[in-house]
Amino acid sequence: MTKRFLLVLTLFMFISCSRSVVVMVPPRIDLTAQPTIGLISFSVENAKGELDEMATQRFLQAITQHQGGVQIIELGKIDEVLNEVGISTLDRNAMQAIGERFNVTSFFYGKISVSDVKPQVSIGALIKSMSVRASFNMSMTSRLYSTESGATMWTDSVYRKGSLANVGLMEGRIPHFSMQDKDEAFMVIIEQMIYDLTRDFRPTAQRVRKQRY
């Protein structure tokens, strides 16, 4: 009986002398030490419209929101940037040339791929409108390159399966995503993917047990 009492008393004292607290853990990747960072617009495969612009702007907002003071310069689309430095492919020489031309120490460049587009529409509905319900898969990948060495400093990717009530389809089942549509469901997909893609750049809350005596 005495041993049981002592065990209960010990557990009670341990619980009473400890408490759980929430602490903020800094981002895994700190960009504030870099003078200036470039941002090349996302490239898109198997889709048309302004998907690249939507994703690029959401990515920029997500980074600057949690990395206060970081300076990011939007460089434009990859073809425009490469044409500016006179190099046709994004290799080490191109990365170094981008750093010299735009005065950036590093730059982000991401890609979006849309696949397995499956329209769900009757022939009659297709005649009336080119906007149909469709399911699709979408992946996002982004990298942070050093303009000095050409090395990849960070990379991550996310994947989602989506389904929208109104998707414009072009010849060959190529979806068309437009900012004019303002499809709330589609914007939610983009927001979630960008949120997951930029997780390494924002602080996180973690619960830890703190001893109190």
Image: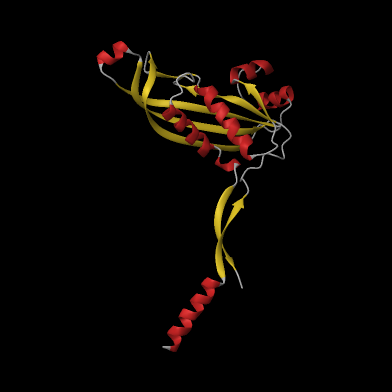
The quadrant of the picture occupied by the N terminus is bottom left
Q: Position of residue 9 (x, y in %)?
A: 49, 80
Residue at image point 55% right, 30% down:
58
Instruction: Give residue 185's quadrant in the image.
Output: top left
Q: Position of residue 22 (x, y in %)?
A: 57, 56
Residue at image point 64% right, 32% down:
145
Which of the two residues, 123 or 86, is positioned nearer the viewer here? 123
Residue 176 visible at all: yes
Which of the two residues, 50 or 34, is positioned nearer the viewer here? 50
Residue 52, compared with residue 127, is above or below; it is below
Residue at image point 40% right, 26% down:
115
Residue 128, compared with residue 91, is above or below; it is above
**Image position of 35 (left or right of 17):** right
Residue 152 visible at all: no
Q: Position of residue 10 (x, y in %)?
A: 51, 79
Residue sticking out furthest to the top? 127
